Image (cartoon, grey):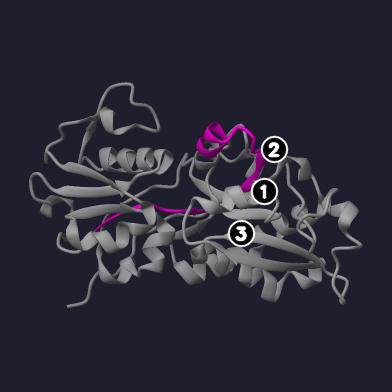
Amino acid sequence: MTGDRAGAPWGRALRGAGAAALAAAVLAACGSPSERAGEGTDDEGLTALRVGATPTPHAEILRFVEENLAADAGLRLEIVEYTDYNQPNAALAEGELDANYYQTVPFLEEYLAGNTDADLSYVSDVHLEAFGVYSEDAADLEDLPRGAEIGVPNDTSNLGRALRLLADSGVISLAEGAGGSPALDDVEDGPLGVEITPVEAAQLPRSLQDLDAAVVNGNYALEADLPETANALAWEGTENNPYANGLVVRSEDAGAEDIVRLDELLHSPRVRDFMEERWQGIVIPVGGEASPPASGPSD
């Protein structure tokens, strides 16, 4: 979610809350990671960190770090994959994880507002996954029929992000004062009179066959091969975009050197090159540029 991360234009209140340490091998252990360093090291003297992530791209990025960079930094990563957005924050708050890597600041803010007992902090932006409007039938926005049914993620932060993209693309109109995270009540009749259908974010790719189009999170689009099997009708820009992804940790671990090291690895030139080569404009290292997929469905 590298550049000067602290000065990124989409910096938010939780951003910069500090790097955080990841727990050692014994998940219920107390104390900071630096205090646990001795008991959390393996036979090679590496500090074990347990990090939750969604499979694509987050877990892939972490595996690249584990396979190529972690040992030289004194770390060993245990990567726990989750297939939805609901579990990783709860697992982190309950001490089952030492950190997670899958979410944006607005998503974390939404989670903390509904889970006031959780004390989690965002470390820094690592990459952006550009939202796209995908369709199996329409080749561009002009091909969408009047009254088209368009799926959007049903969680608050991603729904607002999807509506903003649709509005910026001229598909819908939003009420004056809707702000950066609009709700369904803010949608006014647009030129196409479309119907907006909230769907669980992870289900949007498979729901696309029943929809005229869908606004899909970058990670779920990649997992479902949408850039190769569907048409990208519109694309989210990176300038002043508040939806970068980064590490999240328990606030009590803020500033621990093991998380600082992991965060530095995630911003290293090798990881940046890996993202750019692996996902070619869909997963963008912070400071990079988005580019729409060049290919659509094959005949």
Q: Nearer the viewer, mark 2 or mark 1?
A: 1
253 in relation to 80, above or below: above
Placement of 123 over or under 74, stated as above or below: above
- Identity of the residue furthest to the top in this view: 177
User: For mark 1, what is the residue?
Assistant: 94
Q: Quadrant of the C terminus?
A: bottom left
Task: Describe the element under mark 1 as helix, strand or loop.
Answer: loop
Percent position of residue 232, x then y: 27, 59
For disc 2, the marked residue is 17
- Amino acid tagged 3: Gly
Would you name the residue on which mark 3 appears? 52
Which region shows up in magenta?
110-135
Q: Earlier in the sequence, mark 1 or mark 3?
A: 3
Mark sitting earlier along the chain (2/3) = 2
Q: Which mark is residue 248?
A: none
The amino acid type found where label 2 is placed reads Ala
Q: Are marks 2 and 1 in contact (CB under 8 Å)?
A: no
Nearer the viewer's eye, disc 2 or disc 3? 3
Residue 126 in view, yes or no: no
Q: What is the tally of numbered marks visible in this picture? A: 3
Residue located at (57% from left, 36% from top)? 115
Amino acid type at circle 1 is: Glu
Q: Is residue 241 above or below residue 78?
A: above
Q: Residue 231 location, x and y as percent? A: 24, 63
Q: Is residue 249 visible?
A: yes
Please tell me which residue is depicted at 84% across the width and 72% down the height of the picture: 42
